[in-house]
Image (tube, helix red, strand yellow):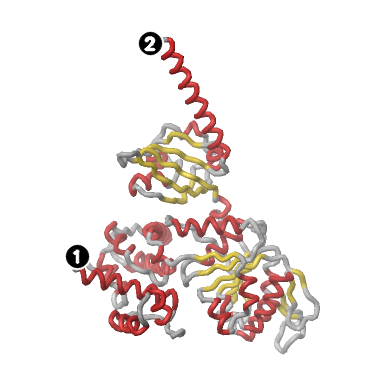
Amino acid sequence: MKETDYNELVRRIEQLEADNSELKTIIDSIYAGIYLADGEGKTLMVNSIYETMSGIPASELVGKNLKDLVNEGYFTESASLVVIQTRSPATVIYTCKTGKKLMAKGKPIFDKKGQLVRIVNTVWDITELMNMESRVEEAREFSPQEDKQRLKLEAMEDFVARSEKMLKVLDLAMRVARVDSTVLVLGESGVGKEIIAKIIHKAGKNNQGPFIKVNCASIPENLLESELFGYEKGSFTGANKEGKIGMFEMANGGTILLDEIAELPVHLQAKLLRVLQDKEIIPVGGTRARRVDIRVIAATNRNLIDMVKKGTFREDLYYRLNVVPVYIPPLRERKDDISFLLVYFMNKYNKKYNTNKKLSNEIIEKLTNYSWPGNVRELQNFVERMIVITKDENISLQDIKDYFVGRQEDSFLEEERDLTLKEQVERLEKAAVEEALRRYGSTRKAADVLGIDQSTVVRKVKKYNIQYSDDAD
């Protein structure tokens, strides 16, 4: 080798070492764990933040395959292994052997030939959020069947998600938790609004304080004011002689979740506005304001803007609540989460009932195609029911069909067949009309969005037997 060639080789090696050193410095300075694996799951490197988060030194991980690390109990799950299996981005929540709970988002990197060559995992420590069972949290919920409050210990369900939409929801929840802004959580029934509210509470500065949930629809209107704001002694017939503090004061130093906020009577909306503006409450029968240090999170499945237009919800209160809106999409819009949720709830209820029931990949695929109008709550109830009532270890397709019999949408259970062009067009047409009606609530608005006459939408509704709320028509 010529001396000039040798010197050039040495220069390139030195430059490569310098670049690698600089890259490692940059990676170590990122405030997130980085776990790099090759296309076969072999650990190539972890940054120092990951070592701190997991409590596991890099020397125990680098060079080892993630399959072996999972089998050896280092981790309960691996995003990289899911990426290898699906060849698409994946997010998992797992526990390390040290007891740390981490969330990893794995992203595949392919070469020009389409071969999977690297998996880059971005990792966050969520131990504080997930270890809810070890810290009893005050939570009070009023039962309309009783004349008093009752304590109810609630543990946060694990946040299980793979879809990009839900990961964005989690990211927004974590960011808004750092500030004191009022949050409005929006979404259909059963999507998990309370879980997101608890995450915001536990990640916030008042996480040591109580988390109080109030269902504004479940408390009789004539009792709601005294339950929220409390009352002074002798303020009304039948009142406690000593008076009673309300739920806002119970939440002092913590968070109050006002679920189904749209059901709050108009005359109480003004009092809530004062709480949001001045952090003060006046008990029923009282004359002096009391200061409260609380974070307010409101939740609803109603369209508050429409209610403002109709005069059933105060506009000024709406804007006070809607400082940071967090919208949780329905399950039908994040089908990537369904298989993860099925597996999660299968494990949960198998453990609860000491069973070993299983769902085949074929059934999971069919269930993924169901719209789940009741969202995560319906899916959870479905899994528990299957675990309880099925006889065999392997849950059969007939078991599934028995659950869905008589429901409006059961075509997802049919055997797949090639559709004619007309059938494909009709399927797409029906889906488009259903979605427009669901989002906008009237045939007139749906027609505007779809670019067709209202009479055409009405004909399609009859043709496909589409059910929808026509309050705005």
Amino acid type, callout 2: Met
Q: Residue at x 28, y 58 (%)?
A: 360
Q: Earlier in the sequence, mark 2 or mark 1?
A: 2
Residue nearest the observer in this picture, 462 or 272: 462
The secondary element bearing badge 2 is classed as loop
Q: Which residue is mark 1?
A: 417
Which of the image's four quarters has the N terminus? top left
Quadrant position of residue 26: top right
Q: Nearer the viewer, mark 2 or mark 1?
A: 2
Where does the image place residue 380, in percent across and percent down from the top left? 41, 66
Query: Which residue, given by chain and number where applicable, does mark 2 sit on?
Result: 1
* Crowdedness near tag 2: few (<14), some (14–19) or many (≥20) residues, C-alpha within 10 Å: few
Residue at 66% across, 76% down: 228
207 relative to 73, above or below: below
Q: Residue 113, image x and y in percent?
A: 30, 39
Residue type beneath disc 1: Arg
Is residue 89 placed above or below 8 in the rendered structure?
below
The answer to whether residue 416 is left or right of residue 101 is: left
The answer for how far apart the CA atoms under marks 2 and 1 are is 67 Å
Residue 40 falls left or right of residue 172: left
